[in-house]
Amino acid sequence: MSRLDTSCIASFDRYAMNSLWNRFQQYYLRHLDLGISLDVSRMGFSEEYIKSMDAAADRAFKSMDALEAGAEANPDEHRMVGHYWLRSPELAPTPELSREILETNDSIFKFVAQVHASGDFTDVLVVGIGGSALGPQFIADALGSVHDPIRLHFLDNTDPDGIDRVFETLSGRLEHTLVVVISKSGGTKETRNGMLEAKRRYDFAGVPFEARAIAVTGVGSELDKYALANRWLTRFPMWDWVGGRTSVMSAVGVVPLALQGLNIKGFLQGAAKMDEWTREKSATKNPAMLLALMWHYAGNGRGQKDMVILPYKDRMVLFSKYLQQLVMESLGKELDLDGKKVNQGIAVYGNKGSTDQHAYVQQLRDGVHNFFVTFVEVRKDRSGEVFEVEPKTTTGDYLQGFLRGTRTALFESGRESVTVSLPSVTPESVGALIALYERAVGFYASLVNINAYHQPGVEAGKKAASVVLELQHKVLAELGAEAKTAGVVAATIGADAEAVYHVLEHLAANQPGVNAILGNGPATDRFALGA
């Protein structure tokens, strides 16, 4: 396998300018209809590297074909993976599934039309976490405007202070606010907590919660049964063949984003067009495969370099956050499909340009070389009137200058980069961008032989949290008027002293009647129940 090292990358500028120009032409992909392009010419791979990956790429293409045809693509959970069918229902493996997708969308659009026609609602509160919030948040921020008929707000954590802040913004408007609760299983504690907090606020304000509550959940789930029993306004399905991080084109995203007033059909059509492009079987002509190969090349197939996402557009600021879940939850796996311990993954972080000119680009250029960059360019500066801040120069010209200048400066220091360009931020282009990265993640997972569609680490964290809460109940039951140290409490209930100490600190800060008497440190701090 041939690979250019950083000294070779830095030496590109010593070649004739035509060398870079020729490399750019060779590794530049563009979709004429979508107007989206991908440029990987500033990555240091060689043609030999691409050829060496032909067999792996071919296996990935075949695996993806089987996935789209309805094969079991998530062997750990014995599930199909069908987010591609959400934008092309006719490709679903059975007529029943195709019909269910179409009927669900039709019912959503009819419901949304009724809401808009009523004029009764100004806001929507979305209660969800992870994929049930990140996708809708990114799209809502990227495509939203002051002219949207409805504003979206999110409860995406179980942080009481954060919940209070959201309800402060909705003060006096709960009567005109719908609540969309999103949870596939209905058992996600963070979402359950947000729902209960919301209901409490509505009850306190004397506003009927159930008449404004919408459930997006699995058929027959805890949430589905609860919503039905309590006569919620309506319910929409989540399917077990759609993972949370790839669910934004299901009811998870379609319901709140359609209520916001966005062009959902254009959003889905853009994704469908990208899906068609990324079914191309030539690795160097398929943008998703080319992206996956760049990730593989940059990190030696082991995730040895971080992926830094730099979108040069304020509307795209949440894209890096969205990609963190899509990439890291999908690819961060301990075991491969053969049960071998591999500890795969790619770390993702980023912020918007040109903000980063004044933040961490300094380290990217001169510091530790443990990353590669993805620049996200939007060619259209603004939809309004052109304004020049200097003769023949606009703020958008400066933004483009910073993007290209940073790209060049990084390249001159041997730092590699990919550039993804959109014509403008529209429902179609954003839908296509999401579809591009969904497919790239699937391809990369095949290249390194892992399951991209489960999340055992997340489930382990949930179980660990339950253990902590059980410990808290035991600790609280042991407290009395006599002040005790964490060590004494731990010995009595048979628990770890440090874990008990953290529980006691939390209780003292939040539980009425639990008092802390501070000593010289954790070993001598004492806790008691008092008035």
Image: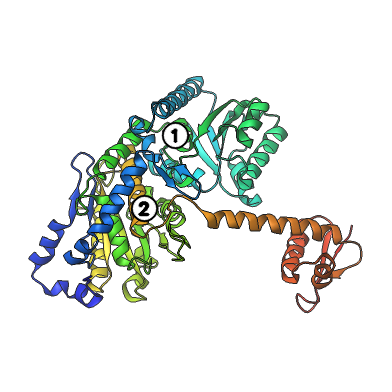
Residue 263 lies in quadrant: top left
> What residue is shown with label 2?
441
Q: What is the distance, in whole Å, between disc 1 and disc 2 at their CAs?
A: 22 Å
Residue nearest the observer in this picture, 414 or 458: 458
Which is closer to the viewer, label 1 or label 2? 2
Instruction: Classify mark 2: residues with Cα within 10 Å, few (<14), some (14-19) or many (20+).
Output: many
Tell me the quadrant of the picture where the N terminus can be found: bottom left
- Element at label 1: helix
Question: Is 292 situated above or below 241?
Answer: below
Identify which residue is drawn at 21% across, 62% down.
50
Expressed as whole percent of the image width and height from the top left, the position of residue 180 reads 55, 35
Identify which residue is drawn at 31% across, 72% down.
365
Is residue 136 toward the left or the right of residue 263 in the image?
right
Colouring method of the image: rainbow
Tell me the quadrant of the picture where the C terminus can be found: bottom right
Expressed as whole percent of the image width and height from the top left, the position of residue 440 reads 33, 52
Identify which residue is drawn at 17% across, 75% down.
11
Question: Is 432 situated above or below 404?
Answer: above
Residue type pointed to by label 2: Val
Residue nearest the observer in this picture, 45 or 42: 45
Of the residues under marks 1 and 2, which one precedes in the sequence? 1
Expressed as whole percent of the image width and height from the top left, the position of residue 382 reads 28, 44
> What residue is shown with label 1?
254
